[in-house]
Structures are given as structure tokens and as C-alpha cells.
Image (spheres, coloured by chain):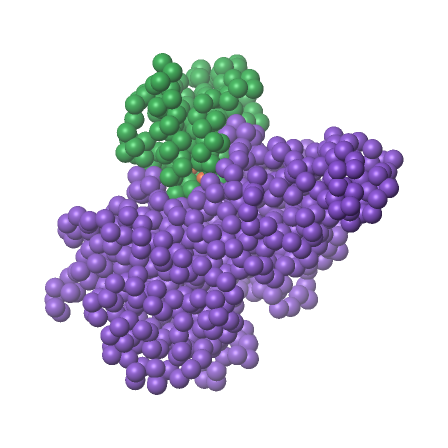
């Protein structure tokens, strides 16, 4: 077992993990953060998306041990207290989720997109999210929610 | 509003795009899906699966696995009930192989251990000795005289003499005189089509958490479309009394029909009983592909005759469906849906249910219908092209209407096919110019829709709010639409209703969430449960006022005196009546239990523009419009979502998705990298038009919408691609190699 010290959503945390265990399993099974989902375990669906030191990663492709000394952000850290992040609001408003299993990953990925590219085109959003599978929505309402969030954020700034 | 009245206008809450009640939980990561539950002392399980398509199981040696530290228990078929027959036996055979492994990925044993990693390691240590048998995975080959027999004696009496034992069921329907009909035609087109199996592709793998003690009392948490069905099947497979197993449905991460069956739940229960510990079992993605329900694959022959003016004189179809190693491919649905959109004097359809060494097919959104539409609508398109006719005009000319005798027997009540065709015809998409290399296709689609056993309870709280318990898992926002219907009836704000998906211990039986039945049947039950509560509220007011119960009406959340007493007393708002309910007769609860049968069929028309790169064979869908009859859209945003989701899945089926088997009978593409479902960059926005032709069988006119949306896309895209490429595509998916082959074939043969 490896002893890992890391920071998740701003909190210092530590856990013991098997050298083969993924960051996704560590988050879910060791820290009880089940917001990130396993849709494939092979880096193809994006349901497990988190950021590590600001970089968007599939946590199923990162080892738990690699989190040592890093800063991890998951969907659980998006809202501030009872105030939802604007992306979360827009997803609800636009019915951009049906079953919602892809939603945590897509929210984490889009937040990261908007931090890096505050004025994305529709094509940019579609390609950025090409690694996040959604089987329910056909993406239409997701793309609209993201585009509108970006526009609102620009207006606000 | 009286108990049986229908309401078609002046809606206050119904028809609004309200926010779903589970929205916050789902965007914050709090919602608990199948794999998100834990229990103290929980073990983790892994399943040992056959690497062979067809093999006799000679011996299973678990000694090495048992010796691994952390392993707590191993189960094989010997740990399940014996003496099952019929459908129950088939389910058990599929859940855990008996004498033979029938497909690549078939479960043969399972291990429970203290961690997921140990369980997986132990599964690899289970030694299974197989005697490999010849296999077959293709539908036409499985019917051929030299095909290996999957299982003797599986055929029922419907199968004609002389067929291979792999043909297990037969269907025939139609009316009129086919030959006379073809003789009347100016042109007859006959062609053959094939479609490969596809997977529902829900993003959440099957997952469950089971607890079963030696006293045979159990608790099961799982992601399922129907927990009463899980309860019934698991009880049978473990030899339990049904009522002693309580099943709770988790949030469900997509199902599309694929979560109407059981796979891992009985296994987890068996492991839990054996180890006396809670057991969590979660499938990997590749297990989902190898061992859970893909669709049937098909081979189809279609013959249609048409007059020069576009009148269809006769239609004939033969549909061979391969449904894996068990009976049940939905060939009768394929046959019945094939010509359903059309008013035909002469029609005949024949279906064969064929077994092969593949996983047992499971329902996938309008099971069987999309393939039928692909074949039939391709031939109609070809006829239109050859006769120089407009494809929508021809469909309008032949469209089924109220009073039409359907191709499979019934006479249609009020239906909305013509309305969808007219809306498609006048949509700007239909007349928009196409660019070089693009083609346009249209298609109609049909699905029966379903009612099914339903129980709903609505309990009023003392503050005048309501708790609504339904038993159909919410797979696409149904808690919102149920609350909207209850709010409409009670005359209280939508936010004042809390909808819960009740577990099997707290409501009567509810059939699975399938057949596009939830908004229709649970919706109808919700409305009737609310009306039952309103009746009690009115009675309490009447007693208070000392007037007749029938002289009280319910309006805007208040009881009001009516008739001769109108205006005599001040209206009594709901919260006044509920505050005093303990003293005026006790709790106020409305409930409704029934098997509603007026589901109301549904039709759609889709328009699609596709662009084909003739050099690479790559197709891009550039514009897509869905027009569908929803009867009455309770929450238009989620109706649109169903339209868009079905279209996107259809696009994947048409262009990309397929089960690829190797010579060895093993599935070659059991990960999302190789089984590629549409991603955001593959698709355009998907435009939607909601047509509302009320269903006479629902108090608000609702028709289910979930399934019909996947019926037209395969054909519409095939028609668009064929127009763009200049060659007819007859096999799905229309992947680049198939398009290139068709182009080359055409170049060689003219
Ligand atoms: S679970 Fe990590 S990408 Fe699918
Ligand atoms: S909402 Fe179900 S997978 Fe995206």
C-alpha cells in the first residue's frame, strides 16, 4: 500500500492505495467522492473527468499514487456552498441532462474549457467535449447550455 | 374535475419547461447511481467469463482462487435454484452458464473478495476446462442446414416443419392478396438488407449491491429499468419468496431497454448468501458489451409494388432476426412495424427468430422497429426515385389514418402520422438547397407504445404539499413530468410536489420502464391518484359545510361550493383541509392501480442531410430534423431530449456502430474506442418539431415518445447517403469500407 498526500477540492486529504489502483477508484472508494463515474475504465468516455493541477484528465487513466502533492478538482467542488456554478445552473435550465451519468464529467470538462477558452465557437465546444460520451441527449442541449454560459460569463466580465 | 374526464386545454403546469427535481443532485455529483452505494463490511465481486463462443464446460476448479488471501466465496451454477423452466430457465442460463458456455463472455463462475483488485485476481485463478464446440454468429448461416445447433428443442410450435433447430419462433401476419397487388403495380422493387447488432451503449455499466442472509431475506440496490421485475426474477433464481427480497432502484445512468433484464443481480445475491456479507458487483465496459443485450442482427427481404401515381399496391417482407443464444429476438415487432405507417390493401410479413452464439439480445428503444423501417423505407425511396415522385407526397398518399386497418390487424384510432408528414413538408429544412456531395433523405417510423401494470400513491402532507410515489425508474426526467401532472390536478405549485421512485416494499407491482410507457401509464395513474385525493378533499369540505359532496368542486387548489350552494361559503384552500385532516377522517391519500391499455401509437417523420466523401467513404450528418407526434408534451424540453437522443443513437447505428465477431466467434470490439458511439463533434444540432395529436386513451392526450425517435433514422440516413453517394446502401452500418465497396461495385457493374 502507498500512502498518498494530496489536495482534493481545496482540502488536504490522505489515503492508502494499492500501486495498481486508479485515481478514480481512490476518489470513489477511499475518499467517498462518487461524483466522478466509471463509464469505461479505458479513457474513452470522460465520465471520470477531473482536473489535476488544472489539467483535464481521465481519472481512470491516472494512478492514485500519482496524486501525491497534486491538486485535484472534482465535480463536488464546483458549487460554492449552496450556490451552484453557473454551468450547473445552465445545465438544469437547458435540460442538458437526461440520465445524468455523463454530467459530472462534462461539467468538469466544460469548466476547464471556459477557463482556457472563454469565447469558444460551437465547433470548439464540440471537439473539446468529443472525449465525453453522452448517450442520452444527442449533445444538442449540452452544447447550447455551454454556449450560453460562455456568453453570460462574457457579459458579466 | 371528474375522475375520468379528459383535459386538453388551459393547462397551468403541464406544457411548461420546469426544472427537474433531481437536477441539483445530478449536477453536483450527489445523485447515487448503481455503483455509488456502499455497505459496512461490503465485499467486491468479479465474474469469470467464457473466452469461447460455444463450449462444453467440463470442469471448474476453484481451489487456486479460494487459496488467494482476501477471497471469501465463489459461486457457480450449482449455487442457484434448480427445477426452473421456460423463460426463468433461459434467464438463469444466461446469468450463469450450466453445461455449456453459449457465447464469448458468458458467465461461468463468480468470486467475492475484500477488494476489487483481489476479486479480479481471483477470477483469473479460477480454472475452467472447456471442450470447444463449433459455433455460428451470423443470422443467415445460423439458419443454414449445416449450422451447429445452439440448443436442441428450443423451438416452439409456430416454426414450420423442416427448419433448422436454431429457428425457434415464427410469425406471419397481413391481409389481402399479395400477388394480385403486385400485378396491379406499375413498378415492383425487390431487395435484401442486413443490419448488424448494436448496443444500447448506456454510459453507466450494470451495478448492484446485494445483501442476502441465511434466512433468505434480502435487500438489493441496483440500476434497473424495473425493480419489481428484478425482484421476481432474482427470487426465482435463488429460490426465495418474492416478498422477502426488497429491491431499490438506484439512479439509472441510461438503459434504453438494456436494463430491463437481470445479469449480475442474482450473482451478487448468491455471493452474499454464501459469504454472509454485502456484495457489490459492477460490470466493466467490456463485460457490458460482451454479455449484455445488444440488439438482434437482421437479414431482410422486401418487395413493394407501386402505381405511377405513387399508390402502393402491395408490400411484402421477410425478417430474419438473430437474437443470441436464446429465443426472444423481437421479429414479430419488426414484422408488425414494417408497414404500419401505410394503408395497404395487400400486405404480408413473415418473421423468424434465430439463435446464434452471441449474447442474448435485449430490448433497445422500439425493439425491432428501426431495422424494419430501414428496409421498407429504403425500397419506398427507390420506388419514388424510379417513378420521379416526391417522397413525402408518396408517403402522404399512402399514410395510415384513423380508421385504417393496420398491416397487423387492428384498426387505428386517432393517430398523427399525416400531421408529422405535413409538418416535415412545410419545414424549411425540406426545401433548403443542398450543397455538392450532399443528399437528403426522409423516413417515417412507428412504435406501438405500451401501458402495463402500474401503481401510484399520492399522500398529502399537513402543509398542503404532496408526496408522490411512483414505481417506474426515472430514465429521462419523469419525476418532473409526474409532478407536473399531479400539480395540475391538485392546483398547487409544481415545487410543492416531491416525486420518489418507491422501492418494491412500498407500492404495488410496477412493470418495467419500457415501451415508452412511463409518461403515459405512470402519468395516467398519477392523474387518477391525484383525482382520488381531490375527491377526499372535496368530501372533507362538504362535511365541514354540511352540504352534499357532489356540490363541491376543486379549483386552483381550493374546494368551492357549487350549484345551488355556489358562493355560499368561502373557498377552502388545500392547506386548510390538510391541516385538520387528522381530526376530519385521517390521512388523505390518493392511489391508483391498474393496467392501462390505451397507450396510443406514435409516428414520426425525420429529415436528414448527409455529406459523403467518395474518396474516404466517410459520412457526415450535416442537418437533422425530427418531427414526431407526442400527443401532449408534458415537459417539452424533455420531449425534445427524447427526440434528439433517439436520433443520435440512430445516427450511430446507421453509420458506425456494429458488433464485429472474429472467425473465432469472439467479439472484436468490446471497448468504446472500437465500438464508437457518436461524439459531440460527429453531430449537428438536432432540430425538433413536436406535433400534438391527443391520444384518446390518456386524460391529457399523452403518447409515449421515447422509442419512436429511433425508428426513422436508419432509413432516413440510408436514403440521404444513397442520394449523396449515388448508390443504394443495403447494409448497416454504412461505415466507410461499406460505402467504398458499394461505390466500387457500382463502378465495376455500372
Ligand atoms: S471511465 Fe475514465 S474515461 Fe471512461
Ligand atoms: S445524460 Fe445520460 S449519458 Fe448523458
Q: Residue at x 28, y 49 (%)?
A: B429
Q: Position of residue B104 (x, y in %)?
A: 45, 57
Q: Residue furthest front?
A: B564
Q: Position of residue B235 (x, y in %)?
A: 69, 55
Q: Image height check: is B452 above or below B459?
A: below
B74 to the left or right of B577: left
Q: Image height check: is B225 above or below B183?
A: above
B105 to the left or right of B65: left
In this view of the protein, which residue sits in the foreground, B282 or B134? B282
In the figure, what tint was chain A given? green
Q: Image height check: is B156 above or below B694?
A: below
In this view of the protein, which residue sits in the foreground, B569 or B578? B569
Number of disc labels = 0
Q: Image height check: is A44 above or below A121?
A: below
Kindly indicate the quadrant of the structure image that contains residue B683: top left
* Ligand 1: image quarter: top left
Q: Position of residue B197 (x, y in %)?
A: 40, 59
In the figure, what tint was chain B given? purple
Q: Quadrant of the C terminus of chain B?
A: bottom left
Q: Residue at x 60, y 65 (%)?
A: B87
Residue B163 visible in the snapshot = yes
Kindly indicate the quadrant of the structure image that contains residue B530: top right
B569 to the left or right of B294: right
Q: Residue at x 39, y 69 (%)?
A: B342
Residue B124 visible in the snapshot = no
Q: Residue at x 34, y 18 (%)?
A: A154
Q: Position of residue B128 (x, y in %)?
A: 52, 56
In this view of the protein, which residue sits in the foreground, B224 or B339? B339
B498 to the left or right of B646: right
Amino acid at each position: 500500500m502507498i500512502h498518498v498526500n494530496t489536495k482534493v477540492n481545496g482540502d488536504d486529504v490522505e489515503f492508502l492505495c494499492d500501486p495498481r489502483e486508479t485515481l478514480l477508484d481512490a476518489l470513489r472508494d477511499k475518499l467517498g467522492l462518487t461524483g466522478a463515474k466509471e463509464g469505461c475504465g479505458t479513457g474513452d468516455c470522460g465520465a471520470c473527468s477531473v482536473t489535476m493541477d488544472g489539467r483535464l484528465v481521465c481519472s481512470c487513466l491516472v494512478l492514485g499514487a500519482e496524486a501525491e502533492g497534486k491538486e485535484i478538482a472534482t465535480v463536488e467542488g464546483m458549487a460554492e456552498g449552496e450556490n451552484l456554478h453557473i454551468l450547473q445552473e445552465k445545465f438544469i435550465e437547458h435540460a442538458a441532462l437526461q440520465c445524468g451519468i455523463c454530467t459530472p464529467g462534462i461539467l468538469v470538462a466544460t469548466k476547464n474549457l471556459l477557463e482556457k477558452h472563454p469565447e469558444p465557437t460551437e465547433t470548439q465546444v464540440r471537439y473539446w467535449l468529443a472525449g465525453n460520451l453522452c448517450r442520452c441527449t444527442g449533445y444538442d442541449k449540452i452544447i447550447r447550455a455551454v454556449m450560453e454560459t460562455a456568453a453570460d460569463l462574457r457579459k458579466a466580465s | 374535475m371528474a375522475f375520468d374526464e379528459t383535459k386538453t386545454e388551459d393547462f397551468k403546469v403541464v406544457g411548461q419547461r420546469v426544472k427537474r427535481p433531481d437536477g441539483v443532485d445530478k449536477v453536483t455529483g450527489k445523485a447515487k447511481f448503481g455503483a455509488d452505494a456502499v455497505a459496512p463490511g461490503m465485499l467486491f465481486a468479479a465474474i469469470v467469463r467464457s473466452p469461447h463462443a460455444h463450449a462444453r464446460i467440463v470442469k471448474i476448479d476453484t481451489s487456486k482462487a479460494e487459496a488467494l488471501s482476501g477471497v471469501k466465496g465463489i459461486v457457480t451454477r450449482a449455487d442457484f435454484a434448480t427445477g426452473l423452466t421456460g423463460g426463468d430457465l433461459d434467464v438463469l442460463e444466461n446469468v450463469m452458464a450450466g453445461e455449456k458456455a453459449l457465447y464469448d463472455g458468458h458467465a461461468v463462475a463468480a468470486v467475492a473478495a475484500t477488494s476489487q483488485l483481489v476479486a479480479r485476481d481471483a477470477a483469473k485463478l479460477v480454472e475452467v476446462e472447456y471442450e470447444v464446440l463449433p459455433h455460428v454468429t451470423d443470422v443467415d448461416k445460423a439458419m443454414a442446414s449445416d449450422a451447429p445447433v445452439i440448443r436442441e428443442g428450443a423451438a416452439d410450435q409456430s416454426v414450420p416443419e423442416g427448419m433448422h433447430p436454431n429457428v425457434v419462433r415464427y410469425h406471419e401476419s397481413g391481409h389481402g392478396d399479395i400477388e394480385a397487388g403486385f400485378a396491379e403495380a406499375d413498378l415492383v422493387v425487390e431487395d435484401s438488407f442486413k443490419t448488424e447488432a448494436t448496443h444500447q451503449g448506456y454510459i453507466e455499466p450494470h451495478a448492484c449491491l446485494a445483501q442476502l442472509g441465511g434466512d433468505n431475506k434480502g435487500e438489493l440496490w441496483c440500476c434497473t429499468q424495473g425493480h419489481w421485475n428484478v425482484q421476481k426474477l432474482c427470487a426465482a433464481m435463488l429460490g426465495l419468496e418474492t416478498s422477502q427480497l426488497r429491491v431499490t432502484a438506484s439512479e439509472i445512468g441510461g438503459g434504453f431497454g438494456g436494463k430491463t433484464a437481470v445479469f449480475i443481480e442474482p450473482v451478487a445475491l448468491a455471493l452474499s448468501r454464501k459469504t454472509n456479507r454485502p456484495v457489490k458487483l459492477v460490470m466493466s465496459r467490456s463485460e457490458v458489451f460482451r454479455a449484455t443485450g445488444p440488439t438482434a442482427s437482421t437479414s431482410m427481404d422486401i418487395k413493394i409494388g407501386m402505381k405511377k401515381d405513387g399508390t402502393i399496391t402491395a408490400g411484402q417482407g421477410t425478417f430474419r432476426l438473430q437474437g443470441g443464444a436464446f429465443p426472444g429476438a423481437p421479429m414479430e415487432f419488426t414484422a408488425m412495424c414494417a408497414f404500419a405507417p401505410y394503408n395497404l390493401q395487400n400486405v404480408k410479413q413473415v418473421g423468424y427468430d434465430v439463435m446464434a452464439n452471441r449474447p442474448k439480445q435485449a430490448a433497445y428503444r422500439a425493439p425491432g422497429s428501426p431495422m424494419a423501417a430501414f428496409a421498407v423505407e429504403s425500397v419506398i425511396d427507390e420506388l419514388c426515385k424510379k417513378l420521379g415522385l416526391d417522397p413525402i407526397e408518396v408517403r402522404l398518399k399512402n399514410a395510415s389514418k384513423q380508421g385504417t386497418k393496420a398491416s397487423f390487424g387492428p384498426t387505428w384510432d386517432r393517430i398523427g402520422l399525416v400531421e408529422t408528414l405535413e409538418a416535415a413538408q412545410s419545414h424549411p429544412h425540406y426545401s433548403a438547397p443542398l450543397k455538392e456531395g450532399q443528399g437528403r433523405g426522409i423516413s417515417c417510423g412507428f412504435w406501438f407504445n405500451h401501458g402495463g401494470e402500474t401503481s401510484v400513491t399520492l399522500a398529502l402532507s399537513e402543509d398542503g404539499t404532496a408526496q408522490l410515489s411512483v414505481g417506474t425508474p426515472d430514465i429521462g426526467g419523469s419525476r418532473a413530468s409526474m409532478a407536473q401532472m399531479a400539480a395540475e390536478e391538485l392546483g398547487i405549485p409544481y415545487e410543492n410536489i416531491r416525486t420518489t421512485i418507491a422501492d418494491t416494499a412500498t407500492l404495488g407491482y410496477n412493470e418495467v420502464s419500457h415501451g415508452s410507457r412511463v409518461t403515459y401509464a405512470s402519468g395516467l395513474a398519477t392523474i387518477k391518484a391525484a383525482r382520488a385525493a381531490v375527491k377526499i378533499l372535496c368530501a372533507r369540505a362538504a362535511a365541514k359545510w354540511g352540504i352534499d359532496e357532489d356540490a363541491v368542486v376543486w379549483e386552483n387548489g381550493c374546494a368551492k361550493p357549487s350549484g345551488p350552494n355556489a358562493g355560499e361559503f368561502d373557498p377552502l384552500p388545500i392547506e386548510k383541509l390538510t391541516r385538520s385532516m387528522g381530526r376530519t377522517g385521517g390521512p388523505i391519500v390518493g392511489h391508483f392501480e391498474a393496467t392501462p391499455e390505451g397507450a396510443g401509437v406514435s409516428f414520426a417523420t425525420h429529415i436528414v442531410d448527409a455529406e459523403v466523401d467518395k474518396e474516404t467513404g466517410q459520412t457526415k450528418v450535416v442537418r437533422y430534423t425530427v418531427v414526431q407526434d407526442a400527443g401532449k408534451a408534458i415537459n417539452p424540453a424533455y420531449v425534445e431530449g427524447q427526440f434528439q437522443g433517439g436520433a443520435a443513437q440512430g445516427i450511430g447505428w446507421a453509420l458506425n456502430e456494429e458488433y464485429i465477431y472474429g472467425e473465432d466467434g469472439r467479439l472484436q470490439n468490446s471497448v468504446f474506442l472500437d465500438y464508437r458511439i457518436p461524439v459531440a463533434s460527429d453531430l449537428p444540432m438536432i432540430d425538433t418539431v413536436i406535433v400534438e395529436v391527443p391520444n384518446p386513451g390518456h386524460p391529457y392526450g399523452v403518447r409515449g415518445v421515447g422509442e419512436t425517435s429511433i425508428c426513422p433514422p436508419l432509413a432516413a440516413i440510408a436514403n440521404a447517403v444513397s442520394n449523396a453517394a449515388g448508390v443504394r446502401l443495403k447494409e448497416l452500418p454504412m461505415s466507410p469500407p461499406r460505402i467504398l465497396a458499394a461505390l466500387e461495385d457500382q463502378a465495376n457493374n455500372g
